[in-house]
Amino acid sequence: MAEQARLIDIYIMGKQYQVPEGLTILTALEYSGYCMIRGCGCRAGFCGACATVYNFLRDPQLRYDLACQKTVEPEMCLVQIPYFPAVKATYDLEKIKADGEKIKALYPDIVKCYGCNTCTKTCPQELEVMWFMTDALRGDIAAVADKSFDCVMCGLCAARCPQGLAPYNVGLLARRMYGSHMAPVSQHLDDRIAEIASGKYDAGLEEMKKAGEKELRRRYTEREIEPALEQNRE
């Protein structure tokens, strides 16, 4: 007989539950009966939808993570913030230039950053958030795009900033500027877009849409990734 997992006590929105040891916060929420319609996302640490704040019953220090990545611990007290109402500028990438001054024009409040580094300490991806905000102030778009590249837009940096800044939206603007106006042209990407527009993959997509779950899982498991990557490198 398989050995049952040890049950541990956790607290969700102030209510006590017992869940098996080893679950992620996300699966523990679902084990406890919560139907996760929002705040679940990709479940692989890529989308940033499951931003979570937690502390412990006898330790009030707040901690931050992604619910699909963090494993539950005894006496953990949980709450989720799948959306944080941070300021997001409106702009047309076709009409703006890749100009560092434009970042400050769209997000003038970034000059209020006083380098407390709370954003960096909060980031579940361990990004150097304060440093790319400094780069944004200096107008170094390439540096901001590079240092914020792995941002999953969870919003935790904005939730913790004492000045009310939204570093993840600043990083997004820089990455869009860099990708639209500064990055080298990718010929294999242009070729692939042309193939899609020509209808080369229409029949295959229709075939996949009609396939059952078992067949789709088989194709996903057996797919060849490396040859495609090698071809793109050429």
Image (cartoon, rainbow, N blue to C red):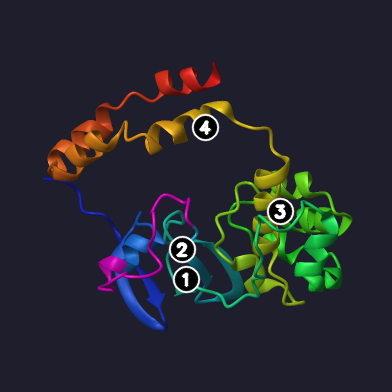
Using the image, tell me which numbered label, if any, was put on residue 189.
4
Amino acid tagged 2: Ala
- Disc nearer the start of the sequence (2/4): 2
Residue in view at x 19 percent, y 33 percent = 218
Residues rendered magenta in the picture: 30-47
Q: Residue furthest top?
A: 234
Asked if marks 1 and 4 touch (Cβ < 8 Å), the reply is no
Q: Earlier in the sequence, mark 1 or mark 4?
A: 1
Alpha-carbon distance for marks 1 and 2?
5 Å
Kindly identify which residue carries mark 1. 82
Q: Decide: few, some or many residues near mark 4? Use Cα within 10 Å; few <14, some 14-19, many ≥20.
A: few
CA gap, disc 2 and disc 4:
28 Å
For the stretch drawn in magenta, the main secondary structure is loop
Q: Crowdedness of circle 3 by 10 Å Cα count: few (<14), some, many (20+)?
A: many
Q: CA–CA distance between discs 1 and 4? A: 33 Å
Circle 2 or circle 4, nearest the eye = 4
Q: How far across and how far down the image is residue 177, in percent?
A: 70, 51
Q: Who's the residue at 60% across and 47% down the image?
A: 150
Among the 4 quarters of the image, the one containing residue 38: bottom left
For the C terminus, the quadrant is: top right
Of mark 3 and mark 2, the one earlier in the sequence is 2
Closest to the observer, 121 or 129: 129
Residue 132 sits above or below residue 205 on the image: below
Task: Residue 195: name its quadrant.
Answer: top left
Q: Is residue 37 magenta?
A: yes
The residue labelled by disc 2 is 49
What residue did someone put label 3 on?
174
**Rounded to the nearest whole Å, what is the CA distance between mark 3 and mark 4?**
21 Å
